[in-house]
């Protein structure tokens, strides 16, 4: 899935998609992949969600591989449940609650107060 990673990187470089800063060094992360499992990480904005959907459709068209939207799950941090429902409907996928595990690692909102 190097092609998908390339599309996501290009969207980030063109400021069409904004990843999430993690860790003390504030490294921006926009995607994690392992084998056939992909986690796209972005801001919970309409623009970013539309960009991801567009990237996935373009990826399908360019590669003849099928994105299984019905197997996808979408989760958001700091957004009301109604907005999560809108995003899930855009992808025709299930909603995911936080925290969740990805490859055995717990993924959750940063609880640190500045």
Image (cartoon, grey):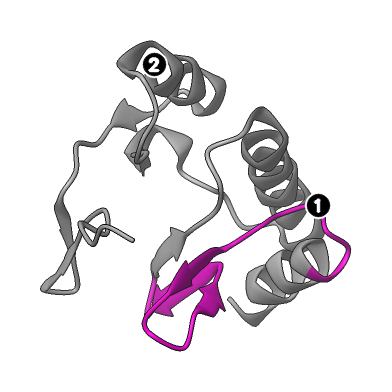
For residue 62, what is the image quadrant?
Answer: bottom right
Q: What kind of element bears circle 2?
A: helix
Query: Does residue 92 lie above or below 66 as drawn?
Result: above
Mark positioned earlier in the residue sequence (2 or 1): 1
Was residue 87 drawn as part of the magenta stretch in this picture? no
Furthest residue toward front: 114
Taking 93 as reference, is 30 above or below it?
Answer: below
Residue 84 is left or right of residue 6, and the answer is left
x and y, in percent, of residue 31 in the image:
51, 69
- Of residue 75 and residue 59, the one placed in the foreground of this image is 75
Residue under the point 54% across and 48% down: 67
Task: Please identify the quarter of the rendering in which residue 108 is found.
Answer: bottom left
Q: Which residue is mark 2?
A: 85
Measure the alpha-carbon separation of dots 2 and 1.
22 Å
- Residue that protrudes farthest toward the right in the picture: 14
> Which residue shows up at 45% across the image and 17% down it?
83
The range drawn in magenta is 13-36
Residue 48, percent across and down?
67, 42
Q: Are marks 2 and 1 in contact (CB under 8 Å)?
A: no
Residue 16 — which label?
1
Q: Quadrant of residue 103?
A: bottom left
Q: Give x and y (percent) for residue 28.
A: 56, 75
């Amino acid at each position: 899935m190097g092609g998908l990673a390339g599309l996501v990187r290009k969207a980030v470089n063109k400021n069409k998609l904004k990843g999430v800063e993690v860790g003390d060094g504030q490294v921006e992360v926009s995607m994690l992949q392992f084998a056939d499992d992909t986690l796209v990480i972005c801001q919970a904005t309409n623009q970013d969600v539309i960009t991801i959907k567009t990237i996935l459709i373009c990826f399908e068209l360019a590669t003849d591989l099928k994105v299984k939207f019905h197997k996808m799950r979408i989760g958001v941090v700091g957004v009301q449940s109604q907005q999560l429902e809108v995003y899930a409907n855009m992808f025709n996928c299930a909603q995911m609650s936080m925290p969740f595990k990805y490859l055995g690692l717990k993924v959750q909102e940063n609880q640190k107060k500045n």
